[in-house]
Amino acid sequence: MARLSSFWRNPFSFLFAPTRHEERAAAYVIREHERGRSLAEILDDPYVRNRCTDREIARLLDRPEVVHALGEGIVAPERERRA
């Protein structure tokens, strides 16, 4: 019943919810960055390009866990480059 009441509070929340492949892509970006790869190199991987649209990559770069893991100084220039 809680799901129904939350739906009525914000019936369009599903439009802004991250998809499963966005969550997996975020985990992939964080994992690969921890292995020492650059963000630009990771975002150009076929794994990311085949699973995320440009809009989803933009949302990926705004995700708090990605910004926290990589650092604002690394994410911000990539956001600007892709804008």
Image (cartoon, rainbow, N blue to C red):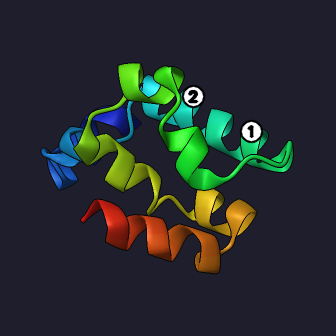
Q: In the rendered view, tell whether residue 1 sits above or below residue 65.
A: above
Nearest the viewer among 56 and 41 is 41
- Label 1: which residue? 32
Quarter of the image that includes the N terminus: top left
* Residue at the (24%, 38%) spot, across then down: 14
Q: Residues within 10 Å of mark 1 (few under 14, many from 20)?
A: some
Frontmost of labels 1 and 2 is: 1
* Residue at the (31%, 60%) spot, across then down: 82
Question: Which percent across, then down, holds residue 61?
Answer: 46, 58
Spatial CA distance of label 1 from label 2 is 12 Å
Q: Residues within 10 Å of mark 2 (few under 14, many from 20)?
A: few
Proximity of marks 1 and 2: CB atoms separated by less than 8 Å:
no
Quarter of the image that includes the C terminus: bottom left
* Residue at the (83%, 49%) spot, across then down: 36
Hey, which residue is sitting farthest bottom in the picture?
Answer: 73
Which element is circle 2 on? helix
* 44 sits to left or right of 37: left
Q: Quadrant of residue 70?
A: bottom right
Q: What mark, if any, has residue 24 been given in the picture? A: 2
Amino acid found under the numbered disc labelled 2: Arg
Which element is circle 1 on? helix
Question: Which percent across, then down, holds residue 6?
Answer: 29, 46
Name the N-terminal-most of marks 1 and 2: 2
* Residue at the (48%, 37%) spot, across then down: 44
Q: In the rendered view, tell whether residue 30 sits above or below residue 76.
A: above
Q: What mark, if any, has residue 72 been given in the picture? A: none
